[in-house]
Each structure stands twice: as structure tokens, then as C-alpha cells.
Image (cartoon, rainbow, N blue to C red):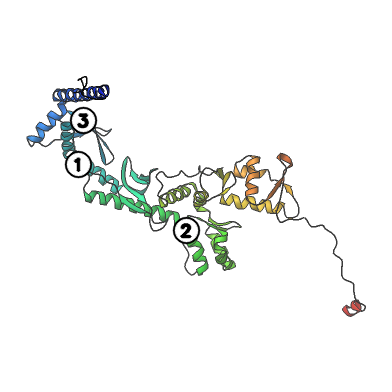
Amino acid sequence: VANRVDWLEDRAHWQQRTREIEDRLSDALHELLTQRFVDQRAVVLMDRLESGVRIEAEMSPEGELNAAGVRLGWLQGFTFQVDQAPSAAGAKAVRKAVRQAVVAPLAERVALAVAAPHQDLRLDASGRVCHEDGQLAKLAAGVDVLKPSVRPMSHELLNQRQRDALRRRAQAWVREEVRRLTAPLDAPEGVSPAMVGILYRVKLGLGTLRRRDAHDLIQSLSGAERKALARQDVRVGMHAVYSLPLLKPEMVARRAWLWGVAREMRTLLPPPPASATSVPAEHTADFYEAVGYRLLGSRAVRVDMVERLDAALRGRTREKASPLPDVAMSWLGCSFEELIDVCRALGYLVHGEGDKARVNRPENTHRSKRKRRRPPRRRGMDKKRR
């Protein structure tokens, strides 16, 4: 019809469409004819399946699976990656062969993962608990930050019993990780409700609690309870209440992934480098607070360094404006300009630049040191005192 001169209004358009259809049909026919002779894998596997012969597979150390002299694909964790089949019939035959062949290897891998020691499991950047290259379960937000939900993976080659076993192992791993994180904040027996409340809120803060959010509880603490907190390495600073053990690198890593899982992040944020006292600000303030840092200007500063710097600045600015402490740059691992930015974010006034920069408290008005005038004495006062 398209080749007729006067049958269609847009004859050139329909001629082009016809050529495209002819080319697609020609390519499809050529592919099917080629597969009939080339897809030897499908022929071998289908012959064995139809004859009822069980397909025995051999797996290489790299996870490559071969059966009946043909390569099926490779086992990656608990998922089988099938080689791209050249035909629909070939793909169907491979799937059937794989289901028969990987039963024993998968059962062995599941048993190894379930019995694996705690240190052999890990969490990947997507929030999945893994053993070697196998994914046991996926973490999601739970009732609070310390109780993430553990969901099974949809491994189609595993049965329900195996998927549940992997989920339970992942759940036990998560609970142990949380227990190791919160153990330094367990409240001793016989302490006051105020101390129990502070420790509990520091736990929910993953090791850090803003002082202003616990002002009433801090005011209720006795001197003995403050000493008891200090013995637990819990510091009550001017800006935050924080746990020193939870500032260690392995603890900071746990805090980072717990925070990310609670917020359903597709990719978990990495923790700051190990033992870094300050880092360039690249994320939100609540992330840095969750891992024990405080966002100050262009940098995130570890809470213990915030308290140390603030104490040094308070001592220097008690009476007058003073030069910035040069040693603070080594405390924070930052430049002089970044130190000025941090001091200003803490609320201090910084005047001048470079070596001439001076820091001062914003409320310090430098009252003059004039002698106070004594009130006039009344007659007989000295005699009466004598």
C-alpha cells in the first residue's frame, strides 16, 4: 500500500515505517535461525532435564558453576548470576538446571553465614548485613534509633526457612552491635532518676546530648552523682553531655550507620576519619551531632575539642581581648582562618586578621578599673567598732 503512488497522503513516511518493520523482522528471524544451531547449552541441558537425569554441577573457587560440560554462570553470595542466554529456550533450561545444581552450595553458604562469628559480619553502604559477598538481611528504620528493623532479602533460590535463618542471624548481629555501643552508658544500680534520665537520653543521642536539652536533669545531680558520671567517662560540659568511649573510631562508625538506617538513607554516610578532631563540614548538623561532632562554621568539631577550645577561650577573655591560642590549630587540625570561623560560631567576637586577630567575649564590656568610692563614715562608728 505504501508503494502505491496515490493511495496515501504521506507516502514517504509510511514507506520509511515499512522498511523499519522489515528490518526488525529480518533481524529477529536471523537470530532465531542462528540460535537453533548455536545454543548448544540449551540443547544439552534440555536433553538431560527431559530424560530425568539429575544435573550435577561443579563450582570453581571463584564461584563459577559448570554442569554437563557447559558454563551456567556464577554464584555471588546467595544469588546466582546467570550468563546471558542467547534464547528464551536457553534461559529457561539454564534456570531449571541452576535450581537443581545450586541446592547444596547454597545450603552450605547459608550454614556458614548463620554460624559465622560476630566479627565476620559487616554492614555495607546500602544498610545490608553481609557475610563475605552474601547479603543476609536489609536494615530499615525501627521504633527508635537503637532498634532498627531487620528485613529478609528476597533470595529466590532460598527457601523460607533459609531466609528466616539469615534474618535471625542478622538481627542477632545488630543487637550485639547496639549493645556494644550502649554498654558504657548503662546506669548503675541505686542512682537517682536524674542520672538514669541523663544516661538514657545520651543513649538515644548515640553518645551526645546537648546541655540545654538536659538542663533540669543536670541541675538535679548531686556532687556524688557528677563524680559517678565522671567515673563512667561521661562528661558534663558547657555545651554537651557526652561519653568519651563513644568517641572512639569503631563507636563513631556504629553511630553513623545507626543514624543513617533510622533515616532510611539509600546510601549510608561514612563516618569522619578515625581520630579526626575536626573535619570540613559536608553534611547536616544532625548527622555530625549523631557521631559526636558539632557543626561550627565551615568545620565540624568533635565535642571534646569544642569543650577544650571553649575553656581556653573563656580563660583568655576573662578580663580583656586576647590573641587566639595558636595551639588550638593543632587541636583541631585546621588553618588559622578556619579557627577564627570556629570561634565566631561559638559566639566569640574576633577582631583583626592574621597574627593581629584578637578574641573577646560578646558580653565583655571591659569596665574601667576605677576605685569604688567608699560611703562616708558616721561619727563614732570607729569607736563603736573598737
Please, is residue 155 above or below residue 373 in the view?
A: above
Q: x, y (%) of residue 140? A: 37, 51
Which marked residue is nearer to the observer: mark 1 or mark 3? 3
Alpha-carbon neighbours of circle 3 within 10 Å: few (<14), some, or many (≥20)? some
Q: CA distance from mark 1 to mark 3?
A: 24 Å
Marked residue nearer the N-terminal end (2 or 1): 1
What amino acid is labelled 3 in the image?
Ala
Residue highlighted by disc 3: 85
Q: Quadrant of residue 379?
A: bottom right
- 17 vs 356, left or right, is left
Instruction: Kindly identify the residue that appears in the image at 11 percent across and 32 percent down.
Output: 46
| Total numbered badges shown on the rendered structure | 3
Q: x, y (%) of residue 275? A: 53, 44
Marked residue nearer the N-terminal end (3 or 2): 3
Q: Quadrant of the N terminus?
A: top left
Instruction: Kindly identify the residue that appears in the image at 48 percent across and 56 percent down.
Output: 205
Q: Quadrant of the C terminus?
A: bottom right
Q: x, y (%) of residue 21? A: 22, 25
Check the image and name the residue furthest to the right: 379
Q: x, y (%) of residue 203? A: 47, 58
Which marked residue is nearer to the observer: mark 2 or mark 1? 2
Label ID, residue 168: none
Residue highlighted by disc 2: 203
Q: Quadrant of residue 229?
A: bottom right
Instruction: Kindly identify the residue that appears in the image at 87 percent across and 71 percent down.
Output: 375
Helix, strand or loop at mark 1: helix
What amino acid is labelled 1 in the image?
Ala
Depth check: 154 or 134 in front?
154
Instruction: Kindly identify the residue that appears in the image at 10 percent across and 33 percent down.
Output: 48
Q: CA distance from mark 2 to mark 1?
A: 44 Å
